[in-house]
Image (cartoon, helix red, strand yellow):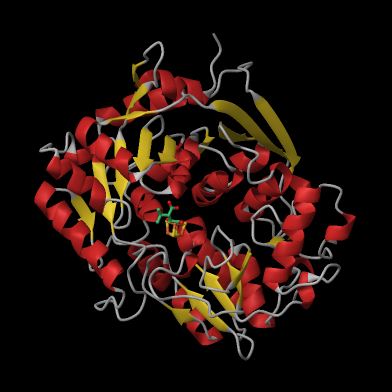
Amino acid sequence: MKKTMYEKIWDAHLVHSPENGTPLLYVDRHLMHEVTSPQAFEGLKVAGRKIRNPHSILATMDHCIPTINRDSISDPIGRKQVETLAHNCAENGLNLYDMSNQNNGIIHIVVPEHGFVHPGMVVCCGDSHTATHGAFGALAFGIGTSEVEHIMATQTIQQKKSKTMQVVVNGQLPEFATAKDIALAIIGKIGTAGGTGHVIEFAGQAIEELSMEGRMTLCNMAIEAGARAGLIAPDEKTFTFLKGKEFAPADEYWEQAVEYWKSLRTDEGAQFDKVVTLNGADISPLVTWGTSPEQVLPVDQPLPDPAQMSDLIKSQAAINALKYMGLQPGIKLTDVSIDVVFIGSCTNGRIEDFRQAAALLKGKKVAPGVEAIAVPGSYPVKIQAEKEGLDKIFIEAGWQWREPGCSMCLAMNGDNLKPGQRSASTSNRNFEGRQGKGGRTHLVSPAMAAAASVAGKFVDLRHWK
Ligand SMILES: CC(C)[C@H](C(=O)O)[C@@H](O)C(=O)O
Ligand code: SF4
């Protein structure tokens, strides 16, 4: 039988499939951060159980950590979570990149930096953006805290089999369209529930041409399309990225691994439950205008008029979103001014993102009144950027150059929007209050964010000097 990549990984990890119950899958890698792990450790302790495979775990601190004044966490809950993770990792002999560790950063950024996830693995983390690691051809998905405990104890997880969806992006992207724009274009087309119950495999020329960073950006946002996970077939780029990394197979195991990884591709003629096709050339630089990533438009298009929408649910959602965002139907985003710009997060906090932004910022200045914050996704990203002099470009343009962490992506660490403030943000979620109570988030690519910081409003990069 011809199989999709998802089915191949599934079959290779199926431990038990009871006739009337939920299948049990083997878990290769378990990623952790401070927010969703404390109760799991506690539960394990109460049950008197040990961690079955400590080597399968990699932990970091990311959500609650400050990006300035690193040594003081003012929020008592955040401080407790960070301290508890440190204690639990020490007690159980786990590999932790704590705040002072030179490998510290956002979990979905640091894991690939060390080659901890390989093609064909099953990867879990108490975090929805675990989908990021699908960029390597690994089945990676977010789990709840009780499942974190289950995996620690048994190295397995109960999982219902998902349906399969293929999203094909044909042809090449135009200039200034990025992986972020592909993600937003897909979500704009299929909606935030479009992928529900499915694992999406991204394919087509535009996907193959993405760098590993771009593939991570895209798979990261599969979750915002409602999917269980995103997948991209591993290829030479994947292998080159992994080769020589700390946790990558070495010596004679490397060749064996690559051979296996090559076998993971979806078989020619395998059937997906659903296929969606986009034309790469049609993807423009996009900006979200509402409070859901599906409320998105090319930057040069006027905002929709809810009165003209035939779908009543969408129309009501648009009315609510425009009200919250303080915007009117028919206006253009290029006329909308912004207060804060944020480049960072596990979606767009990688080196390539800072390179793209710096290329646009060189020799320019942030518009008066705009606060612009660059938060590298990890110390390795920060160090690399500094080696290339990117930090200087940001700082000379008037940006703040911070320490790594989730930061203003979800505003748990004190970096947040004030009520009514409007941001151009490279993160992944724009629901009400995501970046701070009353804050208004517009999701964009790093290039779009950089240009917005200079213009003080959204700009169409295709006509920007
Ligand atoms: C804190 C964590 C559980 C959460 C997630 O799962 O996504 C966070 O990372 C987010 O992006 O909202
Ligand atoms: S950067 Fe944002 S999306 Fe990613 S893990 Fe942190 S809070 Fe979640």
Q: Residue 7: tell me if it is visible.
A: yes
Q: Quadrant of the N terminus?
A: top right
Q: Position of residue 431 (x, y in %)?
A: 58, 61
Q: Residue at x 63, y 49 (%)?
A: 183
Q: x%, y% of residue 333? A: 76, 71
Q: Quadrant of ligand 1?
A: bottom left
Can you say which quadrant of the picture contains the C terminus? bottom right
On the image, which quarter does residue 22 sit in? top left
Residue 432 vs residue 227, the one in the foreground: 432
Q: Provide residue 33's location: percent of width, then percent of height.
A: 31, 54
Taking the image as shown, residue 173 lies to the left or right of residue 120, namely right
> Image quarter for residue 165?
top right
Q: Is residue 350 visible?
A: no
Front residue of 5 and 339: 339
Instruction: Estimate the x, y position of residue 276 in percent, counting from the top left.
Output: 71, 33
How many numbered marks are there?
Answer: 0
Query: Residue at 45% across / 47% down in the picture?
Result: 128
User: What residue sits 67% from the left and 82% below the top?
Assistant: 456
In the image, farthest residue toward the bottom: 368
